[in-house]
Image: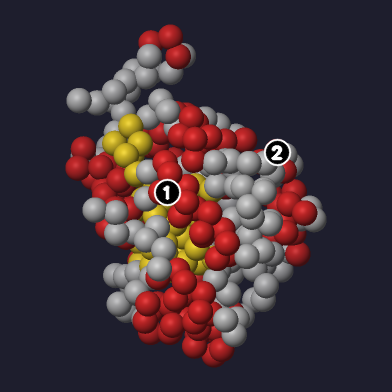
Amino acid sequence: MTEERPAGSGMPLTPRPALVDAHHHLLNLEAVEYPWIRQRSPVLEALLENYYDIACDYSVPDYLSDVSGERLVKSVACEFGAADAVAEAEWVQREADDHGFPHAFIAGVDLTSPTLADVLARYRDMPVVRAVRQPLYWADDPLKRLGPRPDLVTDPAWLRGFELVAAHGFTWDLLLYDEQLPAAHELLRSFPDTRFVLEAAGWPLDLSEDGFRRWEERLQAVSEHPNVTVKAQGLALLFGPSAERIRPWVRSVVRIFGPRRCMFAGHFPVDRLLWSFGELVDALLAVLDELSADARADVFSGCAVEQYGLA
């Protein structure tokens, strides 16, 4: 049986889908050091004026409280810029052991690090770690640079590190702006057996009509690689907190990749600064209203279950 939002909530009565949240963060300022909190980042402050309102502990119980009105069945937590990525993963593993959430974790890596092999071996010993990622976002505007260099995805040393990731069988979360996507095709072709999850719907920086068209073309080209799925986290952050603002972008993602290759993601606590979890679900239900029930289930849960091994 599906649940409905209470009549007094101010929201329309809508059947609530079973959800797998494919992307949220957790923070523990005592157990984990976060350099971006210790020294404020102008890039993050440019991204969202009140971004640093989230610079506090955010544990599994805090997250579950935020999603308590929804039918959340599983979740995937993601690294959050820790100084020691292994220490962060170890803490998340303890959270999973204690609370039963999250069911998977996307751990941080530096593919050029001389300790990469040891880090990946330690991740293999943590059941919660199913995927890894390294921010590669780079743009001409310094206030949009979230990666260390513009050329990592084609750098031979970085690619040698990627070979180790592929050998360990981890899913790779791909963090690139849409204008960087053409440079990633060789990577996607070279590792056809690796699961890639393109984060943030390919993060388009240009939201104009021309930018939308170019983003669609780049996304279409990436979709030709069958080992790539797409995750639409940060919708409020990228486009605005309303069904109207996210509609064209989400519908294009689903049209290009198909529902079985698209996954729902909440991006809390960041997007909590812009809307509630229930408002996110309501907006997506409105945007995806033309899909069949099975197709909506693929987006809200099925794709994430497959890509992150949650069955």
Residue displayed at 72% across by 56% down: 36
Looking at the image, residue 47 sits to the left or right of residue 207; the answer is right
Residue displayed at 29% across by 59% down: 309
Residue 176's place in the image compared with 40, above or below, is below
Which SS class for mark 1? helix
Q: Decide: few, some or many residues near mark 2? Use Cα within 10 Å; few <14, some 14-19, many ≥20.
A: few
Residue 96: mark in rendering: 1
Residue 53: mark in rendering: 2
Q: Decide: few, some or many residues near mark 1? Use Cα within 10 Å; few <14, some 14-19, many ≥20.
A: some
Residue 6 appears in the figure: yes
Work out whether residue 179 or residue 230 is closer to the camera in this orientation and state it: 230
Q: Amino acid at mark 1?
A: Ala
Q: x and y percent of residue 232 in the render? A: 44, 50
Q: Amino acid at mark 2?
A: Asp
Looking at the image, residue 167 sits to the left or right of residue 24; the answer is left
Q: x and y percent of residue 121 in the render? A: 44, 76
Residue displayed at 43% across by 9% down: 8
Residue 7's place in the image compared with 2, above or below, is above
Work out whether residue 61 or residue 23 is closer to the camera in this orientation and state it: 61
